[in-house]
Amino acid sequence: MDVLLIAGLWLDGSAWDGVASALRSLGHRPVPLTLPGQGDGSTTATLDDQVATVLAAVDAAADKPVVVGHSAACTLAWLAADARPDKIAEVVLIGGFPAADGKPYADFFELRDGVMPFPGWAPFDGPDSIDLDEEAKRAFAATAIPVPEGVTTGVVRLTDERRFKVPVLVICPEFTPAQAKEWINAGDVPELARAEHLDFADIDSGHWPMHTKPVELARLIAKGADLP
């Protein structure tokens, strides 16, 4: 089974190298995606461009793929489920939740010169970065790819309620499954509150387990998707 891997902000497809290797060793076909504006040199890419890249990968899969989104890209994975509800086996969300219809994709940090650069580690102090040492933080910041404004300010559009029938696995790194369930039940994540098949898995890591726990993360993706 193909496993499409979509990294969050400031990352390209190489962020999944360790996870992809582990998935291949388990007999699966990882497909790490490098999104427009996040690794291809474009600074004018839009959210629609990124969605189109994800949908092209779904359409190119040999069978129904598992679509994995990390952090902000959880919304991209969910947009794929909305656009291709009959062509996706499962959505796996790592360290994030899908934005609701009509919300901006990822207007989290300051824009400068048409892009949203990595804001430094201060906003991620605490559980998010607890398992990254100073060397890892320096390496991350040095290679972080500024995200085009057209991506971060793009408006999420969800139109097909069949997305709620697509099975969802939420992998919880810097928060716990209990916290995730609490937020969903409180109405903070309206999209997942309507999901008909929703499971949770815990991983003892910060916000970027693909860097710090790639083998464990790969096993959770495979197990959660009920891959043989």
Image (cartoon, grey):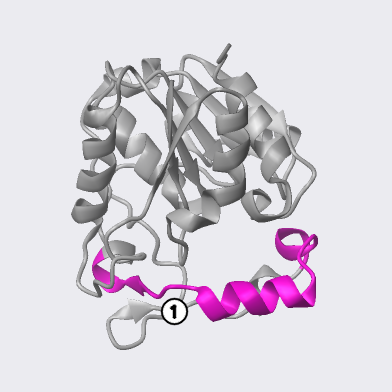
Q: Amino acid at mark 1?
A: Pro
Image location of residue 22, percent across then percent down: 63, 36
Task: Give the quarter of the figure containing the C terminus.
Answer: top right
Residue lying furthest bottom in this view? Answer: 113
Image location of residue 145, percent across then percent down: 43, 73
The magenta span reads 126-150
Determine whether, in the image, residue 102 is placed left or right of residue 178: left
Determine whether, in the image, residue 66 is placed left or right of residue 142: left
Q: Main secondary structure of the magenta part?
A: helix
- Which of the pair 127/99 is nearer the observer? 127
Q: For residue 141: magenta?
A: yes
Snapshot quadrant of residue 46: bottom left
Task: Give the quarter of the figure containing the N terminus.
Answer: top left
Image location of residue 41, percent across then percent down: 28, 72
Residue 119 appears in the figure: no
Residue 113 appears in the figure: yes
**Residue located 22% across and 29% down the image:** 59
Q: Is residue 140 above or below residue 55?
A: below
- Which of the pair 8/112 is nearer the observer? 8
Residue pointed to by mark 1: 117
Snapshot quadrant of residue 226: top right
